[in-house]
Image: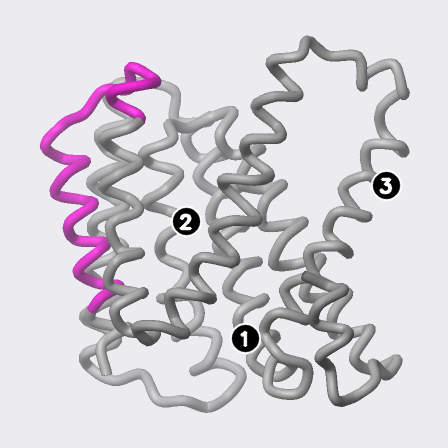
Amino acid sequence: MGWMSAHRATRRLTPHDGAWLFGLGLLGYYLASYLDFLGLHYISAALERLILFVYPTLVVLLSALWLGQPLTRRALGALALCYAGIALAVAHDLRLAGTARDLALGGALVFGSALSYALYLLGSGRVVGRLGALRVTALASLIACGLGIGQFLLLRPLAALAQPWPVYGLALAMALFSTVLPVWAVSEAIRRIGAGPVALTGSLGPIVTLLLAWLLLDEALGGAQLIGAALVITGVMVIARR
């Protein structure tokens, strides 16, 4: 993707562009992913997905704080729906897990991931127009990859790379089917049908995660989680609607 976008580019990268791309790679792909994986040590995949899905509300709040965009009644109502839904899901997980400390730590880590991604989205809006979506995505991903490898080399011995083959198989599947192909598919979908329908379809993410966590990971599925997911999705759709 980087090679293709470089050949299609009409302008050269400047040091200023490089600084922005480094920040985007750090926030949007490296830090957001790392905090998300850390959080999954402490909370269920279903709750993780609900917390992560509130990033549009964080974009709205940060835009109001830094860009002076007004908070309308509709936006405030959507925020209330989202965080009420998360509160229901947290109450469900707390009743099952019984450990408030782990739940608080895991929730904070995943919320930090959502905040990092929201900052990435705000920053990318100032760069994509100049460099193009494909070029920004490719270069920010490469920077995040370098940061991840650098962290491993600093904190782990090379012997830690000796893992069973299923670990490498799962890592390859996550890289291909959960990272590269979705990035391409979303860009292609937006090109074909527009951002609105893509955002509407993407709102199914938390529901799909709830069902898959129940089917594949034996996580409990309760009414509070389903109601919480419905509230979060409704709130996000209210914010996303023109």
Magenta stretch bounds: 213-237
Amino acid of disc 1:
Leu
Q: Residues within 10 Å of mark 2 (few under 14, many from 20)?
A: many
Image coords of residue 36 (percent x, y):
53, 40
The residue at the point 68 percent across, 9 percent down is: 164
Image coords of residue 79 (percent x, y):
27, 65
Sequence order check, earlier mark of 3 and 1 = 1
Q: Quadrant of residue 93?
A: top left
SS type, badge 2: helix
Instruction: From the viewer's side, name the closer residue of 46 and 86.
Output: 46
Q: Is residue 23 above or below residue 141?
A: below
> Left or right of 63: which side holds 85?
left
The residue at the point 55 percent across, 31 percent down is: 173
Q: Residues within 10 Å of mark 1 (few under 14, many from 20)?
A: some
- Read off the residue under disc 2: 52
- Read off the residue under disc 1: 122
Sequence order check, earlier mark of 2 and 1 = 2
What is the tally of numbered marks visible in this picture?
3
Distance CA(mark 3)–CA(mark 1): 26 Å
Indicate the colouring scheme. Answer: one colour
Sequence order check, earlier mark of 2 and 3 = 2
Instruction: From the viewer's side, name the closer residue of 143 and 223.
Output: 143
- Read off the residue under disc 3: 150
Distance CA(mark 2)–CA(mark 1): 16 Å
Amino acid of disc 3:
Gly
Inspect the magenta stretch and tell me whether residue 220 lies in it. Answer: yes
Q: Residues within 10 Å of mark 3 (few under 14, many from 20)?
A: few
Amino acid of disc 2:
Leu
Q: Nearer the viewer, mark 2 or mark 3?
A: 3
